[in-house]
Amino acid sequence: MPTYRRRTRIAAPIDHVWAFHSTVDGLLELTPEWMNMRIEAVEGPDGERDPDVLTTGSRIRMSIRPFGVVPRQRWISRIVEREPDGNAPVEGSAYFVDDMVDGPFRTWEHTHAFYADGNETVLVDSVEYRLPFGALGDAAGPFAKVGFEGMFRDRHRRTAERFGTE
């Protein structure tokens, strides 16, 4: 399965970067405008609406319309792993994994990893994915990384700017 990976050093402590990435507000702030994303609903693991923190079992129903030229694509994402979960303090490293329950890919699993390095944080995004269209999508899969690059470069730049890195 193809994998996309991006790594960036952020000039902020891990607990600050982790807290920012753990919310829907963080997701909205990090998503480039050209994705034209709408958050339609957020549900916590116990069914509560609009939880403050996205913990294991949370679901986000959203839609995207990249560049405003393709039809709007529905997407349901679910947090399947998170360590530490809830509001526990972060010691050294943390991560969460979301997968696509419904959306434009056959498979999408996104790991957001955070590593403390003194007063800085190393942010690593890894996405394992499979494109639609069976064998044709599998053949094109490695080339999709080119499409991911702009989005993740922008997300990492936005994180760095938020914490004064750039």
Image (cartoon, rainbow, N blue to C red):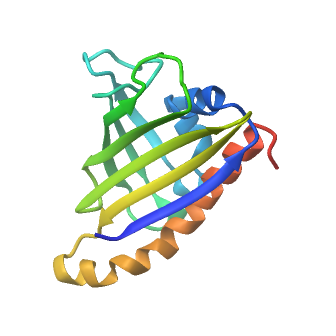
Q: Quadrant of residue 139?
A: bottom left
Q: Residue at x 45, y 38 (%)?
A: 95
- Name the quarter where the N terminus is drawn: bottom left
Q: Residue at x 39, y 66 (%)?
A: 3
Q: Where residue 117 appears, x then y in whole percent? A: 67, 40
| Horizontal arrangement in the rendering, residue 143 relative to residue 155 (left or right) | left
| Horizontal arrangement in the rendering, residue 42 relative to residue 37 (left or right) | left
Pick the residue in front: 161 or 36: 161
Find the residue positioned furthest to the left: 134
Is residue 86 placed above or below 112 in the rendered structure?
above
Q: Where residue 22 appears, x then y in whole percent? A: 50, 30
| Horizontal arrangement in the rendering, residue 148 relative to residue 133 (left or right) | right
Q: Where residue 27 appears, x then y in whole percent? A: 53, 39
Q: Residue at x 37, y 42 (%)?
A: 97
Q: Where residue 100 appears, x then y in whole percent? A: 29, 49
Tag count: 0
Is residue 75 placed above or below 94 in the rendered structure?
below
Is residue 18 placed above or below 154 in the rendered structure?
above
Is residue 97 placed above or below 107 in the rendered structure?
above
Q: Residue at x 42, y 80 (%)?
A: 143
